[in-house]
Amino acid sequence: PRPAMTDPMELVSEFSCDACHIVAGEGGDLGPDLSTIGATRDKDYIRRALLDPNVELAEGFDADMMPDDLGEQLYASELEILVDFLAAAK
C-alpha cells in the first residue's frame, strides 16, 4: 500500500482533481470551481460529493464525470483532509 498523504494539495495532485476542477485558483474547467466551495457548501455536502459524486450534481455538470470509486482510493484520513481543506476554501 502507498503511504498516507497529509498535504491537501498533494492529494489534489495525486488524484488529479485539478485536471477537471479549479482548486486554489488553478486547474481545469470540466468540473465545478472548488476554489471557494466552502463559502456555499458544508463539510457534509463536500464529503458526500467526494464519496458519491452522482447523487447531488452541481448545476450545469453531467453525471459520471467524476470517478465514483474515489472513496475507495482515499484513506479515511485523506478524505477528511480534503473535506477540511475544501470546506475552508472561502
Image (cartoon, grey):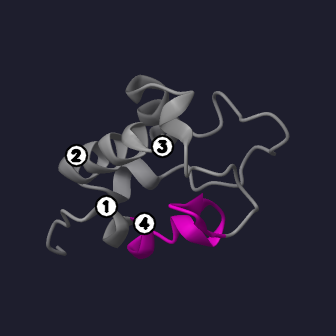
Kindly identify which residue carries mark 4.
12
Rendered location of residue 70, percent (x, y): 45, 54
> Left of 72 or right of it: where is 21?
right
Q: In the rendered structure, which segment of residues is drawn in magenta? A: 12-27
Mark number displayed over residue 50: 3
Query: Circle 2 — which element?
Result: helix
* Spatial separation of the CA atoms under disc 3 and disc 2: 12 Å
The answer to whether the residue labelled 3 contacts the one labelled 2, judged by CB atoms less than 8 Å apart, is no
Q: In which quarter of the image is the N terminus?
A: bottom left
Q: In this view, does 88 lie above or below 7?
A: above
Query: Circle 1 — which element?
Result: helix
Observer-side mark, 3 or 4, equals 4
Residue 52 visible to the viewer: no
The residue positioned 55% from the left and 39% from the top of the image is 37
Q: Does the magenta stretch include residue 76?
A: no
Q: In this view, does 72 lie above or below 48?
A: below
* Spatial separation of the CA atoms under disc 4 and disc 2: 15 Å
Name the residue type under label 2.
Answer: Ala
| Disc 3 crowd, CA 10 A, few/some/many (<14, 14-19, 20+) | some
Kindly identify which residue carries mark 1.
8
Closer to the N terminus: mark 4 or mark 2?
4
Q: In which quarter of the image is residue 40?
A: top right
Q: Nearer the viewer, residue 25 or 47?
A: 25
The residue positioned 31% from the left and 61% from the top of the image is 8
Mark number displayed over residue 76: 2
Query: Circle 4 — which element?
Result: helix
Closer to the N terminus: mark 3 or mark 1?
1
Rendered location of residue 28, percent (x, y): 69, 69
Name the residue type under label 3.
Answer: Leu
